[in-house]
Image (tube, rainbow, N blue to C red):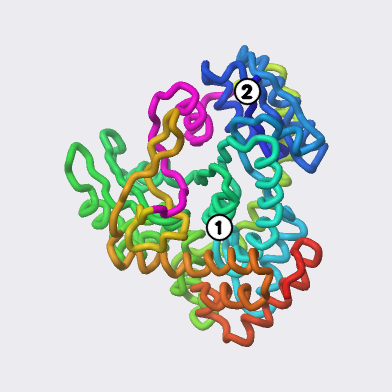
Amino acid sequence: MKKITFLGAGSTVFAKNVLGDCMTVDALQDFEFALFDINEERLNDSEMMLNNLKKGMNSTVTVRSYQDRKEALRGAKYVINAIQVGGYDPATITDFEVPKNYNLRQTIADTLGIGGIFRNLRTIPVMQAFARDIKEVCPDAWFLNYTNPMAVLTNIMLQEGIKTVGLCHSVQVCASDLLESLELPTDHIQSKIAGINHMAWLLEITRDGEDLYPEIKKRAKAKQQSTHSDMVRFELMDKFGYYVTESSEHNAEYHPYFIKSQYPELIEQYNIPLDEYPRRCVNQIEEWQHMRDDIVNDQNLTHERTHEYGSYIIEAMETNKPYKIGGNVLNTGGLISNLPKNAVVEVPCLVDASGINPTYIGDLPEQLAALNRTNINTQLLTIEAALTQKKEKIYQAAMLDPHTAAELSISDIISLCDDLIEAHGDWLPTYS
């Protein structure tokens, strides 16, 4: 029996979305869904939910949970990764609270910034363990990575020799959400997106061949006169010429311009939600307590296919019917020719039975490539830190992070890194 293994299956709602999507696909009805999570209670919840969903959707897939990760992976054709190492408590709390001692504030901290660096450092050893298992028990499996920080973790798996693509939620909805926010129609739209994860660029957007950017920029400029939730992205589009895929709360901390202790008025001016990710974590924990019974115990549970790429990728590979995604892949051969070749980039990819086939983009507009490179610098040094286990590489990654470097001196950055290493304790390997 063919197998899809879900690592981090205790993410019950996300497991419902991705594996529920797979249940809608005729070509996947003979698959086993192998579930693994270190949280046994959440794993059992997901197994119960998926069996109810299987019944409600008249699916013939097999749902099975595993206590042993290697056995869950054994023989898998596809591996879906949705783990979060350290969880909200203690890891996310640490990522946010320790930097506050240095007056360094963050919004999400799951991709870049000082929080993103340490999220990477505690997750990379786990990913390397996954890679070891995969090479032993399912060496030909495709690894579909949903875990952040996306670019670095995807890069690590590719360096380990695992067939990997990184998948984000923001590419699919970027153009339509932008148009809807500006009260523009979304039909007959053609768009082109490329860059890096969470900082890919809407390079082209047309309707029936007409360039929509002039009207988009006109309406966005007018909208900036009032407070709204996308002010950072509209400011970036105004100054750099293009709209960025990921949200304003994310992009506020990827650049040196927006969260500045010297200019506290910018927080209100750009409507920046500081500490947004911890707030979401608390809300999700509380919401789960209320919604658990409805999802886990509902005997008539059903599902409609979402826009998540996972099921479409697997269907395309199984049926050889091509499907286009925005995927995170290594910049092999210079897919984006003015970004480093050892970076992971987010570009359109064609998926069929031959696998993931990324498309060549060429040069990004230089100002966009320059913004991407500021983030890539920190990504590549974070990888080097993890692979060499040298503290100086952690320091260098942090010193090159745009937001951290804009706020702190070199000595404070080094001190903050030391504090975070100590606070993380056993969540990190030993750095020399």
SS under mark 1: helix
Residue 57 drawn above or below residue 94: above
**Residue 152 shows which numbered tag?**
1
Instruction: Give the image quarter of residue 358.
Output: top left
Quadrant the C terminus occupies: bottom right
Amino acid beneath label 1: Val
Write down the region rendered in magenta. 303-332
The amino acid sitting under disc 2 is Lys
Q: Is residue 148 visible?
A: no
Rendered location of residue 81, percent (x, y):
63, 42
Q: Which residue is mark 2?
A: 2
The x, y position of residue 368, in whole percent, is 34, 63
Q: Residue at x 57, y 48 (%)?
A: 161
Snapshot quadrant of residue 387? bottom right
Give the residue at x 35% y 49%: 193
How crowded pointer 1 is (Cα within 10 Å; few <14, some 14-19, many 20+) is rated as many
